[in-house]
Amino acid sequence: MKYYLIAGERSGDMHAANLMRGLAQQDPQATFRYYGGDAMQAVGGELVRHYQDMNFMGIWEVIKNLGKIKRFLRECQADLLAFQPDVLILVDYAGFNMRMAKFAKQNGLRTFYYISPKIWAWNTGRAHNIKRWVDKMFVIFPFEVDFYKQFDYQVDYVGNPLWDAIQQHHPLPDFKAKHQLDERPIVALLPGSRPQEVQKMLPMMLSVRVQFPQYQFVVAGVSNLSTQMYEIVQSTPDVKMILEETYDLLLHSEVAVVTSGTATLETALFNVPQVVGYRTSFLTYKLGRALIKVNYLSLVNLVMDKPVVKELIQSECNPQQLAEELRQIMEGGVKRAAVLADYATLRAKMGSAGASEKAAQLMWQYLQ
């Protein structure tokens, strides 16, 4: 069969790649064409456009790039019609993919959605459109099943694909020696994978280093961003940056500072206490405050429905508060034991590995 996939960001690329592997097991004749990234390319098929071209974060950033986004949409729609897949598989990336779902429905193409847009966070009415445009939805959080039931829409819960990525990871035995890390405990800094995230968060994260001379600070860098994004690291004494080895870094870290996103859940699954930060443009923040309907920003707190990890948002994300919260979750800190206990409950809620394989099996069955 012919599969057309659309993943518009780094985490979606990873999860789509694992799904493609699962589909290839079910369907050895599978042909893939996609908007995605390096992980999907490693599986095979044909990349039409890399997600780096489309990776805009925040309301203001999207508004500034509306012309470019519309051009990408027209390009994708024309390519989809030319390819005529047996199914279009959308992976998260709500703004772009919801429009593609509508277009596919109008043109008689079957559409599956893997990893639901976070419509439960804001603009819940979009569930009506998903029900109208999407043939099958595959969700990765248990609470999403109940959410969609409110709209009389049955979805398939497949588990969380982060477990698949973590299970596939093979730790580097000489990680610390390779990067010349000493015996001091490590504070991992995960500033994000989008340019806007790194620009806003990395300077803030680095600003607290001087308050913890007994720790070594290590930045988790990503190769899809230019080296210019990390220039500040070079001018900050006693800080290292490591590219594309985030899981190994988390395995060796005592605590972490994480930009809100998928990385908050990954950090928790590696059992590393964390402080979650988020800073964006003034307009994006104000609009977000008005629209968002959930109580928490981080996936950890959303899944647990309680404040397991501290969230420092906008003006609260400052050096003083960040340093204070870090002290409370470091070894001997007053909050560390409670965070680790909640992480154990979180891991139980998240199930086990196999989400990508289960989703692929269900998709293949539905396609029959």
Image (spheres, rainbow, N blue to C red):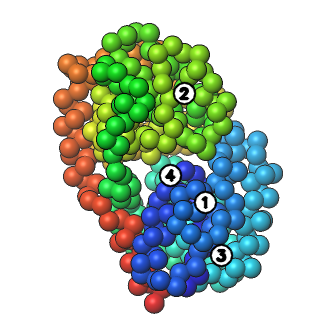
Q: Residues within 10 Å of mark 3 (few under 14, many from 20)?
A: many
| Point 69% across, 38% down: residue | 60
The image position of residue 116, as x and y in percent, is: 48, 61
Instruction: Give the side of residue 344 with respect to residue 136, left or right.
Output: left
Q: Residues within 10 Å of mark 4 (few under 14, many from 20)?
A: some
Identify the amino acid type marked 3.
Ala
| Discs 3/2, front | 2
Q: CA distance from mark 2 to mark 1?
A: 25 Å
Identify the amino acid type marked 2.
Met
First in sequence: mark 3 vs mark 1? 1
**Residue 11, numbered circle:** 4
Q: Which residue is mark 2?
A: 201
**Residue 280, numbered circle:** none
Question: Is 31 above or below relative to 91?
Answer: below
Q: Regarding mark 3 in the picture, which secondary structure is present there?
A: helix
| Point 38% across, 78% down: residue | 361
Identify the amino acid type marked 1.
Gly
Instruction: Choose between 106 and 162: the one closer to the eye.
Output: 162
| Point 58% across, 42% down: residue | 223
